[in-house]
Image: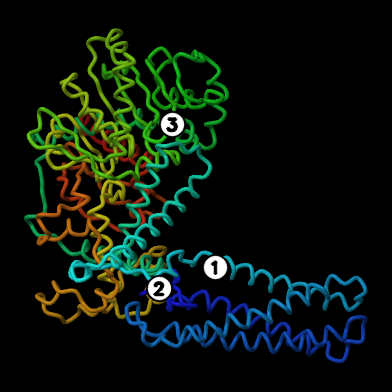
Amino acid sequence: MPGLVLFGRRWAIGSDDFVLPGAFELFVRVVWWIGILVLYTVHKGQFDCAGGGLLHSYLLVLLVLLAAIICALSAIVCISMRGTISNPGPRKSLPKLLYTRLLLYLPEFIWAVVGAVWVSDSSVHCEKTVMSVIFGTVVASWIIIVFTIIGVIIVFDPLGGKKTIYLTDGVSRNLESSQSGQLLYNVKSTATRVWEKRIRLLCCCIVQDDDHRVAFTSIAELFRTYFSDTDLVPSDIAAGLTLLHQEQDKMESCPKEPEEVLCHSPSSPVTDDLDIEVENAAHYMHFAAAAYGWPYYIYTNPFTALCKLNADCCRNRPTASDITGSDRHNFHFGSILQITGLQYRDFIHISFHNKIYEIPFFVALDHKKEAIVVAVRGTLSFEDILTDLSADCEDLTLEDVLENGFVHKGITQAANYIYRKLINDGILNQAFTIAPEYKLVIVGHSLGGGTASILAIMLRNSFPTLKCYAFSPPGGLLSKSLADYTKHFIVSVIVGKDLVARLSMPNMEDLKRRIVRIVANCNRPKYQILLRGCWYEVFGGDPDNFPTELDGRNQDDLTQPLLAEESLMVHRSPSYSALEDDSHLNSPPQYPHLYLPGKIIHIVEESSSKRLCSSDIKYTASWSKETVFSSILISPKMVTDHMPDVVLKALNSLAQEHSACISC
């Protein structure tokens, strides 16, 4: 729903967000009031100790104050339970109740100070039980006050005090005055500065240079554009995600149409080609995972990793010329040796240097597959996150591609950095001098997969036989022409409902539109949606059939936005038009559709063992189209399916199953 308006400004909280926290505080306050009442009743007439008069007055006033707070909280919870997310009308009296509750903090604060003074007074000699209870009361009062202040800081919206005006196309044509344009410009500039300050605060621990400042501004503009056209609070988004997950699970449980099921005979060439690529991918995934260094190795071997690294890393310690960047105690290189199973002499170059647009990689000789492997690391630092979020589009023109291609700007700059190192520093020449008959293979996971893909495009003309394996690459990477061009030499591997493989600005806009639509049209209160959603995510069960305003409407009506939906969409951002069929041809979208690179292997968890004590998981792999990943799927596994250990486990399982079939 629209953010709550208090003290003349908008806050990042809705009027229906006080049910659960209010109920929790109400429970604490009732227990607290009962405890104080019992204490007062039991010790009534026994306040003749030193300081007892003040204690008697303190308890009486505290009982009255707690009773008033309990009444205010009860009213707030009851009012906040009314209506729906998009219908705040029944909750219109909530601001007055909140003002009343905030006023009660003043006497509570004063009484907390009085209690603290009384407890700390050395001249007070009352019963020990009474002293302990009063001490607990004072501590509880201060805890609630501190948490309230923290909560206010969290829900504070820096832009809430501005009269934020977002103009639709129709309105902007009627506002031609310079004053209107200046007002809109000031609002946008303020929003960008706010996001930039937030990003700088998150990245305060890294050294910032000109590249960082440019990236901060670009990312801030991206966030400002994306969040500027909706009036949703964080809890609305959480409710929308849980509704989408349940709706998605209901659709998946429905039987598919026959034409949607694609099957290959066990002996078909397509299946044989798939099995070969899965086997190769399982082999090269070890290199992509090894690029993460010791964090990945310790994560996957928590009990033995440190012992092995301490025992092995001092052997064959490389010289300074072999490694660039920091590798304290040689842990990174030792982890790479352990994961790949290679010897030190097999490594041509290792770089742990990490800045924005400059990510670590290594070049090694793979004698098993007779390949020179360039492995690029995925996201592991704040600098890598900034590279990921620099999602503007940039041109990449190739002679072999008729149309100009668009690529992810940040990842392209990272690929340019590695390209310069490989070519200008003679790293690949050195490798092919040692093994001239070997082929070139480029691999990477996540950010490394996207960088490896664009690097492969850059090196394709010089090395026509090169191969690239991109594991869980970002979805918004290449334009359609470039994606089609890479099908000859790039293989992307995606597991399950991987979020990153579906991340692109058009997909994010589509997710936002779906959240707004399902939230605006649900007829249940938000607290019911969230409670049911938490139960469903933790314990499973059947998806809830939430009634919506869409029930009973004609199919033709579903194409028209409902009033509730329109109230939550303030205006449409530039990238929103990319999703519309009737978008203006004269104003191309800021974020065009970008796709996954190459041919795509989609690995899906087929089934789990029905035995309670067994955790065996079976996977199936199939060739997939890039259009399958044009929508973000909500699932508890949307993040875990992206993790390198999960990808490696799935590929190893498929490779072992294929080997077992061949041996049989």
Q: How many marks?
A: 3
Say which amino acid is labelled 1.
Gly
Sequence-wise, the earlier of marks 3 and 2 is 2
Residue 448, by quadrant, is top left
Seen in the image, is 147 located left or right of residue 557? Answer: right
Percent x, y for residue 226? Answer: 31, 58
Dot 3 alpha-carbon crowd within 10 angstroms: few under 14, some 14 to 19, many 20 or more: some
Which residue was labeled with disc 3? Answer: 354
Sequence-wise, the earlier of marks 3 and 1 is 1
Seen in the image, is 658 located left or right of residue 161? Answer: left
Measure the alpha-carbon separation of dots 1 and 2. Answer: 15 Å
Measure the alpha-carbon separation of dots 3 and 2. Answer: 40 Å
Residue lying at 91% horizontally and 70% vertically, measured from the top left: 122
Seen in the image, is 200 located left or right of residue 506? Answer: right
Dot 2 alpha-carbon crowd within 10 angstroms: few under 14, some 14 to 19, many 20 or more: many
Per the image, label 1 sits on a secondary structure element best described as helix
Q: Is residue 343 visible?
A: yes
Residue lying at 64% horizontally and 71% vertically, measured from the top left: 145
Say which amino acid is labelled 2.
Gly
Q: Which mark is residue 151?
A: 1
Mark 3 vs 1: CB contact within 8 A: no
Residue 71, by quadrant, is bottom right
Measure the alpha-carbon separation of dots 3 and 1. Answer: 36 Å
Q: Is residue 548 above or below residue 485?
A: below
Residue 458, by quadrant, is top left
Q: Nearer the viewer, residue 521 or 4?
A: 4
Which residue was labeled with disc 2? Answer: 3
Q: Residue furthest top?
A: 433
**Position of the C terminus by quadrant:** top left
